[in-house]
Image (spheres, rainbow, N blue to C red):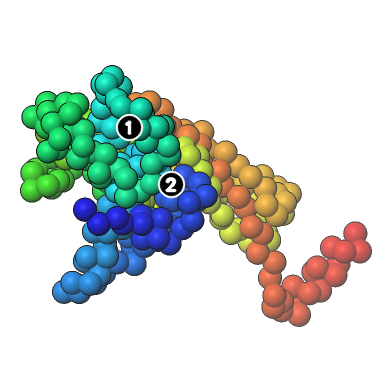
Amino acid sequence: MEFIDYYKTLEITKNATDNDIKKAYRKLARKYHPDLNPNDKKAEEKFKEINEAHEVLGNPENRKKYDQYGKDWKHAEDFEKARQSQHHYTESDRQHHQEKFTESDFSDFFESMFGRSGRGYKSSQVKYRGEDYNAELRLSLMDVYRTQKRTLTVNNKKLRINIPAGVENGQTIKIKGHGGTGRGGPNGDLYITFAIENNTPFRRDKADLYHHKEIDLYTAVLGGDIIVNTLTGKVKLQVKPGTQNNTKVKLKGKGFPVYKHAGQFGDLYIMYTVNIPKKLSAKQKELFSELSKL
């Protein structure tokens, strides 16, 4: 099996943080996604390579194994078990195994443990856990305003999942046992990362929403009623006389659902922007002049 440098695939260094890996994966996945590159075989192949790299480096446990064992990282547990089972060495063997293994040594070591030499465990006794799968699910903000069910196709199988209201952009959930099929061992897991597009006029901060509302100078000075939008419809607000620019008003419970807390919602904050008139008639100027003298 040829060694693949997953760090190079994701265009990152070995010192990259988990957040760096996530950002690099999302950037490249968007760039080479088949939906954005129809009939482009190279882009499709690149997309598969990016997903494979993220399956390994995006999982801290897999990344640790990969950094230590290279292309044979999937057999890390078998290496450790085999090492422990080797009780009868020659002195030269013992010295050899105490040395730090290089990348090319691992395949030879694996073969000596489970292959033709017949030492250690027999190949039929080795159990492999299935690979973990990673997928990205794109939704709009309103798609996650309510809990819903979605049917996904994973490895040519239909999978119906429950998406709780309040899921955040970039959040990853694990679906146990729906990854690759194990060989004598358990199946891998499926990790779904949500890419949520906010196509609303509201800015989201977890369960709270923020919205700027423009009011005219006269309403700010004298007060009055205005209509504002929320995610569930329009509401009437009373603007107090003398309202200043950037005044913030809280509409309790009009925000976004709290993740995995059914019936609980954040708040909606309306921030007033006072619109100062740029063109005044002669009469308006005269009236403002009189006001300034009072």
Residue ID at (68%, 70%):
277
Residue ID at (60%, 50%):
271
In the rendering, at what x and y percent does residue 251 appear? Answer: 52, 38
Q: What's under tag 2, amino acid-wise?
A: Thr
Residue ID at (66%, 59%):
274
Which quadrant would residue 111 be assigned to in this image?
top left
Q: Is residue 2 above or below residue 35?
A: above
Q: For numbered disc 2, what is the local secondary structure?
A: strand
Q: For numbered disc 1, what is the local secondary structure?
A: helix
Left/right of residue 15 with respect to residue 132 in the rendered view = right
Q: Nearer the viewer, residue 212 or 195?
A: 195
Left/right of residue 91 with respect to residue 212 in the rendered view = left
Residue ID at (29%, 25%):
89
Q: Is residue 261 above or below residue 205?
A: above
- Residue underneath mark 1: 93
Q: Nearer the viewer, mark 1 or mark 2?
A: 1
Mark 1, Cα crowd under 10 Å, few <14 / some 14-19 / many 20+, is few
**Hey, which residue is sitting farthest bottom in the picture?**
282
Mark 2, Cα crowd under 10 Å, few <14 / some 14-19 / many 20+, is some
Name which of mark 1 and mark 2 comes first in the sequence: 1
**Hey, which residue is sitting farthest front in the picture?**
91
Q: Is residue 160 visible?
A: no
Q: Nearer the viewer, residue 221 or 189?
A: 189
- Residue underneath mark 2: 230
In the rendering, at what x and y percent does residue 39 appear? Answer: 16, 74
Left/right of residue 160 with respect to residue 166 in the rendered view = left
In the rendering, at what x and y percent does residue 241 appear? Answer: 70, 47
Left/right of residue 20 with respect to residue 288 in the rendered view = left
Q: Which mark is residue 104?
A: none
Q: Is residue 5 visible?
A: yes
